[in-house]
Image (cartoon, rainbow, N blue to C red):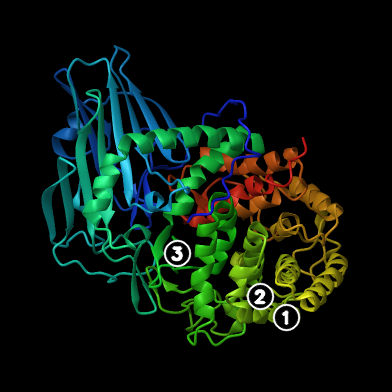
Amino acid sequence: MNKSLCYVLAGVLLPVMTSVAFRPPAVPLVSVEPHFSVWSAADRLYDRDTTHWAGAVQPLVLLLDADGTTYRLCGRGRGHMLELPVLPQTSCRVGATVTRYSFDNGKGLSAVVDFTTPRLTDDLDVFSRPVTYVTVRVTGAKNAAVHASITEAWATNDDAAKMSWATNTVAGVRDLSVGRVDARPFSIWGDRKRANWGRVHLVGPVISPPSTTTYVLAYDNEKSVRFFGADLVDWWRRGGKTFAAMLEEAVRDISALEAKCRAFDEKFRRDMEHVGGAKYAAIAELAWRQSFAACKFVANTDGEPFLLSAENDSGGMIGTTDVFYPQFPHLLISSLTLAKASLAPTCHYAASTNWPYAYAPHDLGLFPIAEGQYYGMKKGQAVGGGTDDTYRMPVEECGNMLILLAAVAQAEGHADFAGRWWGEVTKWAEYLAQFGYDPGNQLCTDDFAGHLAHNANLSVKSIVALASYAKMAELRGEKDVAAKFRTLAKELAPKWIAAANGGAFGGTRLAFDRPGTWSLKYNLVWDRVLGLGLFPPEIAEAEMRTYRAVAQPYGVPLDCRKTYTKSDWIVWAGTLTGQRKDLEFMCEGLYRFLDETPDRTAFGDWYMTDSGLYRSFIGRSVVGGVFMPALLSKTHEFAK
């Protein structure tokens, strides 16, 4: 049974607040999983063809026949379609689960187009369906019909591949599908790829009532993830359900799920505005579907849920630890089942003979094939080209795993989940006790400008992780172990303060041996989330003074070396003081980047704070990190 932590604040109904006019760099339309993810990178839905998250054209065309005139609503199309008049678009609104476009010709004819992906975590069978609903509601026409079409590009990574079309009937309506003649499961892997197997389905039109038309877009990938020799299936398939049966259920549930999604989105918006204001809510709405759509939710061979991220636009790894680490606030506020499902694959791998090291893995392979860590295992696969501990991020990943396992334990009130792999968990804590406080010259997740020794933010993660291990040991009744590691963390915190003192603008240093420098100390946030009591509030206050001093038009840079930043870490840093004004300040630059950047991509989490240009990393699950304020609001109200 799904055990949800529902984001709703204190269970109260909050007043409706004013939303902001927001132009996302690209608009999510079909947001299901890495191989089934379609966006509109334009201000108006009919200005450009729709694309895969990575940019390959995957055209969806929507046409409206109204009283003898055919209008284009979505996509540019080909041939005569380019000559068709458009029904002028008047607005676009991105919600957590529904993207709504409105159209009006000023003469009485209007239409509303909803793209609904039911990413609602109270029912994980529905959540895992590879389905998006496209519903068009028309007013002001005596006779109206809506036509939808897709192309073969939706179903292959090879535009020259031979394709086959098929027509069937589902729930009494037409089901048109397309796929490769020679489907090749798991024939592609890595980054920026579309699938080379499975079939894409366009079901409809479903008419109900006469003025409303729905098409169902669905993807039957048949095989989902390969995990150490076993081909795993989507969560909804785990009991043997067929694709046809799932599709019939999806058609049957159209009205109920669309209504449920609209209600969810309205309450979600109110709650997020309560947490951080209208601009924060707009960021959170854009992040909700993308965070989930960059993952595959599958069942392992024992029926255990696995949530496996694809490292979109950053190497193509699967199940990367420092990718689900920033995403984790989203998982914690939405579903404990999903939170644990993101940790379990790594824990299983670490406990197997496939992983002989004393530290936690960085990744599980190349999406969608998890057959062992890829990054840093061969020369040239890691930044700097190394193949040893220096390049496998051991302090980073041990810290990530211990902190996240402790967050699950706190949410559940016991450490039984971590206890399944307690031997490995203990190894990671012992590794950090030896190497974590003053890290050597090893890579960490933010070393885009080059890695360096004595990294102060990485040291913070290690100290917090040691206290996290103590917290789990206490829950397990291991009082002596808990006392030992809690004492160590408590002793290291003031030692860190002394070593990191002397940063720019009164804050802390980038590295212990670099006076006058600064960096975002976002890892400090877990001290508050987990109630560890390691660092005094004066540290966060000094950090915020630094961030305000170095802020650029589009936010605060990651550190003093370059002017780029990470969207997840900006928001985490905005929570450190517990002051609403500081959260809003840190979110302001991120909001402006998303609203103004000329780079029309899915939500990019690495960008330039001076120019607002996208740097890299698009369509990734790490945008779930923007839900850290929502997670903290469950126990800490932001002071105003």
Residue nearer the viewer, 83 or 318: 318
The residue type indicated by label 3 comes to Pro
| Quadrant in which residue 301 is drawn | bottom left
Q: CA distance from mark 1 to mark 3?
A: 33 Å
- Residue 638 seen in this snapshot: yes
Q: Position of residue 273 (x, y in %)?
A: 61, 34
Residue nearer the viewer, 279 or 214: 214
The residue type indicated by label 2 comes to Val
**Left or right of 90: which side holds 405?**
right
Of the image marks 1 and 2, the number of the one nearer the N terminus: 2
Label 1 vs label 3, nearer the camera: 3
Task: Evaluate if marks 1 and 2 touch, with contact meaning CB atoms under 8 Å apart.
Answer: yes
Question: Residue farthest to the top?
Answer: 107
Q: Which residue is mark 1?
A: 435
Q: Which residue is mark 3?
A: 305
Q: CA distance from mark 2 to mark 3?
A: 27 Å
- Residue 444 seen in this snapshot: no
Q: Residues within 10 Å of mark 2 (few under 14, many from 20)?
A: many
Residue appearing at x 14%, y 34% in the figure: 80
Task: Evaluate if marks 1 and 3 touch, with contact meaning CB atoms under 8 Å apart.
Answer: no
Q: Is residue 352 above or below residue 13?
A: below
Task: Evaluate if marks 2 and 3 touch, with contact meaning CB atoms under 8 Å apart.
Answer: no
Q: Is residue 560 above or below residue 465?
A: above
Q: Which residue is mark 2?
A: 395
Quarter of the image that includes the C terminus: top right
**Left or right of 304: which side holds 243?**
left
Label 2 vs label 3, nearer the camera: 3
Q: Is residue 205 above or below residue 422?
A: above
Helix, strand or loop at disc 2? Answer: helix
Of the image marks 1 and 3, the number of the one nearer the N terminus: 3
The residue type indicated by label 1 comes to Phe
